[in-house]
Image (spheres, rainbow, N blue to C red):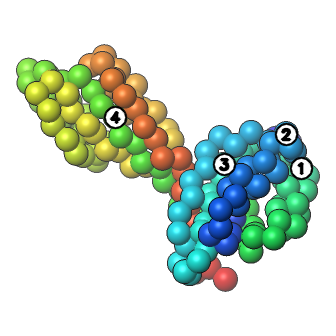
């Protein structure tokens, strides 16, 4: 059965690691829907959080292949455990002063924030799951979205990790 997987890959922070990891997914026929990479809790290591769709058997094969890459230290299928997942989006919207109170109302309802104001636009920051970000963007469309930038999902298993 095909479903969405969120995978955490702990790697050495070295040039070319991202390319080798993403290439492995492509060779196995997995599309990477989202990937976020940043420094991990230990110096010299980075954590990749990858969201992909596929069946369990193929994902198991990809995990085994990942471990064969020299810079991969640990692979965890986060989606097989209770997890916390978040994404950040910046949305630049056309906003003349006359419509700003309406937009501020949406921002407050979504617990988002306005991070920049210019004479005829606002940049709104929203953090949450993909559905929250998509809902916010949909409600802002009538005002005219000028630009949208999303980070991709980052996630952790709930509770104390082993």
Q: Nearer the viewer, residue 2 or 67?
A: 67
Residue 7 can be seen, yes or no: no
Q: Position of residue 70 (x, y in %)?
A: 81, 70
Q: Position of residue 128 (x, y in %)?
A: 43, 49
Report the disc number at residue 58.
Answer: 1
Q: CA distance from mark 2 to mark 4?
A: 32 Å
Left or right, 116 with respect to 162, comes to left
How crowded is the residue under tag 2: few (<14 C-alpha within 10 Å), some, or many (20+)? few
Q: Position of residue 72 (x, y in %)?
A: 75, 69
Q: What residue sits right under mark 4 in the picture? A: 91
Q: CA distance from mark 3 to mark 2?
A: 14 Å
How crowded is the residue under tag 4: few (<14 C-alpha within 10 Å), some, or many (20+)? many
Image quadrant holding the C terminus, namely bottom right
Compared to residue 103, the image places residue 109 above or below, namely below
How crowded is the residue under tag 1: few (<14 C-alpha within 10 Å), some, or many (20+)? some
Compared to residue 129, the image places residue 40 above or below, namely below
Q: Residues at badges 3 and 1 in contact (C-beta under 8 Å)?
A: no
Residue projecting furthest to the left: 98
How crowded is the residue under tag 3: few (<14 C-alpha within 10 Å), some, or many (20+)? many
First along the sequence among labels 4 and 3? 3
Q: Residues at badges 1 and 2 in contact (C-beta under 8 Å)?
A: yes
Helix or strand or loop: what does disc 2 sit on? loop
First along the sequence among labels 3 and 1? 3
Q: What residue sits right under mark 2 in the picture? A: 29
First along the sequence among labels 1 and 2? 2
Q: Quadrant of residue 75?
A: bottom right
Residue found at x 65% / y 67%: 14
Q: CA distance from mark 4 to mark 3?
A: 22 Å
């Amino acid at each position: 059965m095909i479903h969405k997987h969120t995978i955490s890959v702990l790697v050495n922070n070295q040039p070319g690691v991202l390319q080798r990891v993403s290439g492995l997914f492509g060779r196995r026929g997995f599309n990477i829907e989202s990937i976020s990479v940043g420094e991990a809790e230990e110096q010299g290591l980075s954590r990749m959080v990858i969201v992909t769709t596929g069946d369990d058997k193929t994902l198991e094969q990809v995990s085994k292949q990942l471990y064969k890459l020299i810079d991969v230290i640990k692979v965890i299928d986060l989606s097989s455990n209770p997890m916390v997942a978040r994404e950040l989006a910046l949305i630049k919207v056309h906003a003349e002063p006359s419509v700003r109170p309406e937009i501020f109302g949406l921002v407050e309802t979504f617990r988002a924030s306005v991070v920049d104001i210019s004479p005829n636009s606002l940049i709104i920051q929203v953090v949450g799951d993909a559905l929250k970000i998509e809902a916010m963007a949909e409600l802002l469309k009538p005002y005219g979205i000028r630009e949208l930038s999303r980070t991709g999902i980052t996630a952790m298993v709930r509770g104390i990790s082993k």
